Image (cartoon, helix red, strand yellow):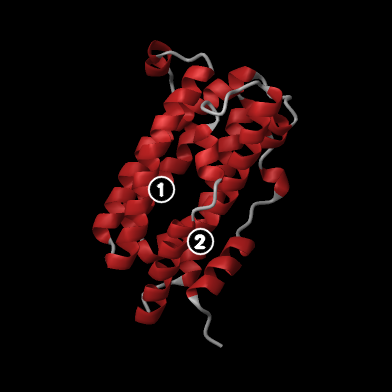
């Protein structure tokens, strides 16, 4: 029986769900056991990730057909909003502009946006929709956990937590855009599910590397 786009997105998200042990840092944050310096490093790394991903999504939108373009444009717009919230979180971590400008990013943390940029240049945009949607499910869960922990254990204000709240909240319009993009690709026969899964596995691996690297930082 032919799968619908919604079914394919759901099964792919389940199949690519990360192993619980692949992210050692978020559980520490959830218990309030992570050092505040790690939170500052998280903010500093995201200052590089967010604008890089935004440009990659815009490039994918330029390369994609109308349905996929709408999805990537929405992602890019989301990154713009997230960047505003990230400035507040960074300041709440005690990081000023001079420290942020002088910061040297960690290769293990920047592998993820580097791969997203590779996808923007090389991958079929329809395949990337499927891979990213699966990855965002895990990222959203991490953000929900962090947002709660920042309030409970670290005394952060709602305003300071807005970056994580933004990614943790449901995004039905974005989900619907993903369904439309994948369905269009399925109907046109332009979606390579095997290749999309490969991209998704690598995204999850680089996501895990991001958190592992942060956890190992002195």
* Outermost residue to the left: 62
Residue 178, percent from left and from top: 43, 63
| Residue density around tag 1, few if under 14, some if 14–19, many if 20 or more, within 10 Å | many
- The quarter in which the C terminus is drawn is top right
* Outermost residue to the front: 158
Q: Which residue is mark 2?
A: 198
Residue 63 sits above or below residue 23 on the image: below
Compared across the picture, whether 105 is left or right of 76 comes to right
Compared across the picture, whether 205 is left or right of 30 comes to left
- The quarter in which the N terminus is drawn is bottom right
Badge 2 marks a residue whose secondary structure is: helix
Does any portion of residue 27 appear in the rendered image? Answer: yes
Which of pointers 1 and 2 lies earlier in the amino acid sequence? 1
* Outermost residue to the bottom: 1
Compared across the picture, whether 154 is left or right of 186 comes to right
Q: Which residue is mark 1?
A: 116
């Amino acid at each position: 029986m032919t799968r619908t786009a919604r079914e394919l997105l759901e099964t792919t998200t389940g199949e690519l769900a990360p192993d619980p042990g692949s992210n050692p840092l978020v559980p520490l944050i959830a218990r309030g056991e992570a050092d505040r310096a790690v939170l500052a490093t998280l903010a500093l790394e995201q200052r590089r990730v967010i604008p890089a991903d935004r440009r990659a999504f815009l490039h994918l939108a330029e390369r994609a057909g109308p349905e996929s373009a709408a999805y990537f444009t929405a992602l890019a717009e989301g990154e713009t909003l997230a960047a505003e919230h990230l400035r507040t979180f960074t300041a709440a971590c005690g990081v000023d502009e001079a420290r942020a400008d002088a910061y040297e990013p960690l290769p293990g943390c920047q592998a993820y946006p580097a791969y997203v940029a590779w996808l923007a240049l090389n991958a079929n945009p329809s395949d990337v929709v499927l891979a990213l949607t699966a990855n965002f499910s895990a990222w959203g869960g991490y953000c929900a956990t962090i947002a709660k922990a920042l309030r409970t254990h670290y005394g952060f204000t709602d305003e300071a937590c807005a970056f994580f709240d933004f990614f943790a909240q449901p995004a039905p319009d974005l989900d619907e855009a993903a369904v439309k993009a994948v369905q269009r690709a399925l109907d046109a026969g332009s979606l390579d599910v095997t290749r999309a899964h490969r991209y998704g596995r690598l995204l999850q691996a680089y996501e895990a590397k991001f958190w592992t690297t942060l956890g190992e930082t002195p």
